[in-house]
Amino acid sequence: MSILDIRVLGDPILRQSTVPVQEITDELRTLVADMFETMHHARGIGLAAPQVGRTERLAVIEIDGEPLVVINPEILERSGKAKAEEGCLSIPDIYADVERPKDVVVRAMDLDGNTYEVQATELLARCLQHEIDHLDGKLFLDYLSVLKRTAALTKWKLQQDKYPGFIRHTALETPEERERHKHPEEEL
Ligand code: NI
């Protein structure tokens, strides 16, 4: 397994749509394992393929020690509303409140090629929506008001020079850097 570089805000791949997975191959299994390792290393709870420079329609999530592989996901139902702070491994150190449906039903495929449905609420529902957004080229900043988005982008511009080529060399980050990125509201 290996820790992959994470693409940060500004890399065009974060704005592209992904391609549905047609077949579970060994290469795909390796990618999923690498994405879990990368997410753990970066202290995140969710990571989508475009964030590691890939175009497959898949994401990994791990909340409370429960790993979830989400391949070709679609949201079947949305209900309620909830607001909570979000962050993103591709936009380090930027956090903002985002309002989303509180509950969702998602259909996806696992690594064995089996289709499953998950009824999610609270953090898992938020994380699934955030990751599925990534697969559609969407970022949590898109939900902010113009004022709040401008403020977030201004803060981001002050530190984006730390990521030449829009690449975050996750494996090279020191424990101090990773601690600094850690935030009470986990990053997705
Ligand atoms: Ni994210």
Image (cartoon, rainbow, N blue to C red):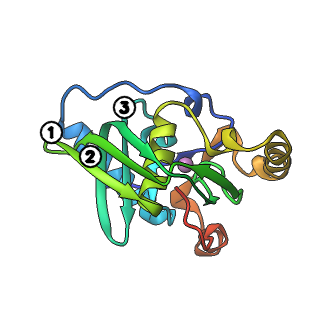
Q: Nearer the viewer, mark 1 or mark 2?
A: 1
- Where in the figure is residue 186, as x and y percent of width and height? 55, 66
Q: Is residue 59 left or right of residue 84?
A: left
Examine the image and state in which quarter residue 25 appears: top left
> What residue do we see at 37% from left, 72% from top?
64
Say which label, 1 or 2, has the lower sequence index: 2
Say which label, 3 or 1, has the lower sequence index: 3
- Quarter of the figure that contains the N terminus: bottom left
- Where in the figure is residue 97, as x and y percent of width and height? 68, 57
- Which residue position holds label 2? 30
**Number of other residues with Cα within 10 Å of mark 3, as a class: few under 14, some 14 to 19, many 20 or more:** many
Secondary structure under tag 3 reads: loop
Asked if the residue at tag 2 contacts the one at tag 1, i.e. Cβ–Cβ closer than 8 Å, the answer is no
Q: Nearer the viewer, residue 160 or 128?
A: 128
Cα gap from disc 3 to disc 1, whole angstroms: 15 Å
Amino acid type for the residue under numbered disc 2: Thr
Asked if the residue at tag 1 contacts the one at tag 3, i.e. Cβ–Cβ closer than 8 Å, the answer is no
> What residue do we see at 36% from left, 31% from top?
56
